Amino acid sequence: MAGYVLGRIAQAIPVLFLASIGVFLVLRLVPGDPATMLAGQDATPTQVQQIREDLGLTDPLPVQYGRWIDQLAHGNLGKSLSSGLSVSHLLALSFPPTLELAIAAYLVALLIGIPLGVLAGSRPRGSWDWILSGYSVFTLGVPHFMSGILMLLFFTVWLHWFPTAGRVAFTSNPLESIKYLALPALALGSGVAAVLARYTRTALADVMGMDFIRTARAKGLEPRVVVVRHALRNALVPVITISALQIG
């Protein structure tokens, strides 16, 4: 096991090295000049050139790459060209709300997707199967930003159930935080829920046609027991795999 882990780490080193070169070159080759952006439209060419020299943009690319890797290794991600603040500071400010939203959206996806897939897969071509098809077409066909606008219009402007914007930290007031997280989490998690529901439906429908399910039905077990205790346990293996992949 230790040899396998060490081997994987050894393989990751050249991959990370090549990836760092690719990221560095992309940052340097994209259109636009950071010095011009920092100097402003009214700056003279001399001022722009001075800023370019202060940033080290006039140095050869290998020298810039070495300096960039050294700063990255020491945790220095530089400063934002738009705000002038440290990138590490901006990431630290954005991480808590991003984590809260990601967890909330993932929970929404699990709570909607798996039960809906179970209902549709237990009776293929039934009413719940058609509901799942319509839900999948809407959530996967409509972009998140559009579905979010529609949710704001319906739940906020018309019904006044949720606030339009803002955030309350979950650690300070959980109930108020859920109120602000509800719509963003629903807009972000609804698409993932459709993916999980389709996989759950397909896996469960395949299991429902197997011999041991017919045997369980022949013993007189209730349909709910057959689905939950026998079919769902065997169908959850691919669903768990897909659910884990959706975390990204």
Image (cartoon, rainbow, N blue to C red):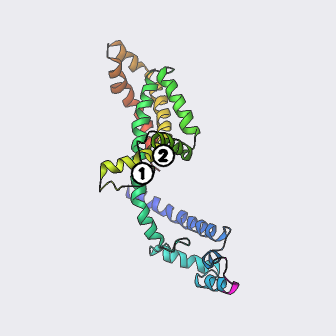
**Dot 1: element:** helix
For residue 188, the mark is 2
Residue 60 x, y percent position in the rendering: 65, 81
Q: Which residue is mark 1?
A: 101
For residue 71, the mark is none
Residue 98 x, y percent position in the rendering: 43, 56
Residue 112 x, y percent position in the rendering: 42, 36
Residue drawn 41% across and 58% down? 5
Seen in the picture, residue 13 relative to 159 is either above or below; the reply is below
Residue type of the residue flagged with mark 1: Leu
Residue drawn 43% across and 23% down? 122
Residue drawn 39% across and 20% down? 213
Q: Quadrant of residue 169?
A: bottom left
Image quadrant containing the N terminus: bottom left
Seen in the picture, residue 91 relative to 101 is either above or below; the reply is below
**Dot 2: element:** helix
Q: Is residue 197 magenta?
A: no
Q: Is residue 43 magenta?
A: yes
Residue type of the residue flagged with mark 2: Leu
What secondary structure characterizes most of the magenta part?
loop
Q: Quadrant of residue 2?
A: bottom left
Q: Earlier in the sequence, mark 1 or mark 2?
A: 1
Is disc 1 surrounded by few (<14), some (14 to 19) or many (20+) residues within 10 Å? many
Foreground of the two, 53 or 37: 37
Is disc 2 surrounded by few (<14), some (14 to 19) or many (20+) residues within 10 Å? many
Confirm whether residue 207 shows in the render: no
Distance CA(mark 1)–CA(mark 2): 9 Å
Residue range in magenta is 41-46
Q: Quadrant of residue 115?
A: top left
Q: Is residue 20 left or right of residue 248?
A: right
The answer to whether the residues at label 1 and label 2 have Cβ atoms under 8 Å apart is yes
